[in-house]
């Protein structure tokens, strides 16, 4: 999010959006060496997957997480992960 918003709307907007998003999650996971190796495997498996998507997917897989809220359709390629569109994420939260 930070990278894309910075490119499209500038650093100030990107920082504000990232700070707001950070309040929505309980924890931000670090990227470990094991995650980087898993990301390399994912890149080899999925030709169209971008590097940042591979890192996100690797961190999720290694942490045992299955859902990600994202507008990025390329994450559908990764077996075992479920991409949830942002507009649908609010409905998931309300059902709990």
Image (cartoon, rainbow, N blue to C red):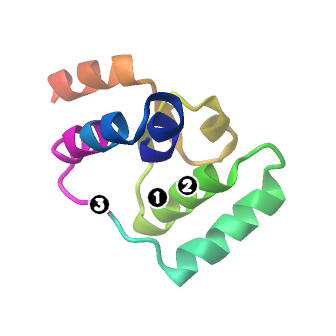
Percent across and percent down for residue 8 are: 52, 29
Residue sitting at 51 percent across and 61 percent down?
61
Quarter of the image for residue 27 reads bottom left
Q: Which mark is residue 57?
A: 2
Q: For mark 1, does the 10 Å Cα neighbourhood hold few (<14), some (14 to 19), or many (20 or more) residues?
A: some
Percent across and percent down for residue 41 are: 74, 67
First in residue order: circle 2 vs circle 3: 3
The residue where tag 3 is placed is 28
Percent across and percent down for residue 55 are: 57, 60
The residue where tag 1 is placed is 60
Vertical order, 62 against 3 (above or below): below
The answer to whether 31 appears left or right of 25 in the picture is right
Element carrying mark 2? helix
Residue sitting at 43 percent across and 35 percent down?
10
Percent across and percent down for residue 21 are: 25, 40
The answer to whether 57 appears left or right of 22 in the picture is right
Vertical order, 4 against 36 (above or below): above
């Amino acid at each position: 999010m930070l990278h894309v918003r910075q490119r499209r709307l500038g650093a100030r907007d990107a920082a504000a959006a990232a700070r707001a998003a950070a309040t929505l999650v309980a924890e931000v996971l670090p990227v470990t060496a094991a995650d980087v190796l898993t990301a390399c495997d994912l890149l080899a498996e999925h030709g169209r997957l971008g590097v940042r998507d591979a890192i996100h997917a690797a961190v999720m897989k290694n942490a045992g997480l299955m859902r990600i809220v994202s507008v990025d359709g390329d994450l559908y390629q990764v077996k075992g992960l479920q991409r949830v569109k942002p507009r649908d994420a609010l409905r998931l939260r309300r059902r709990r």
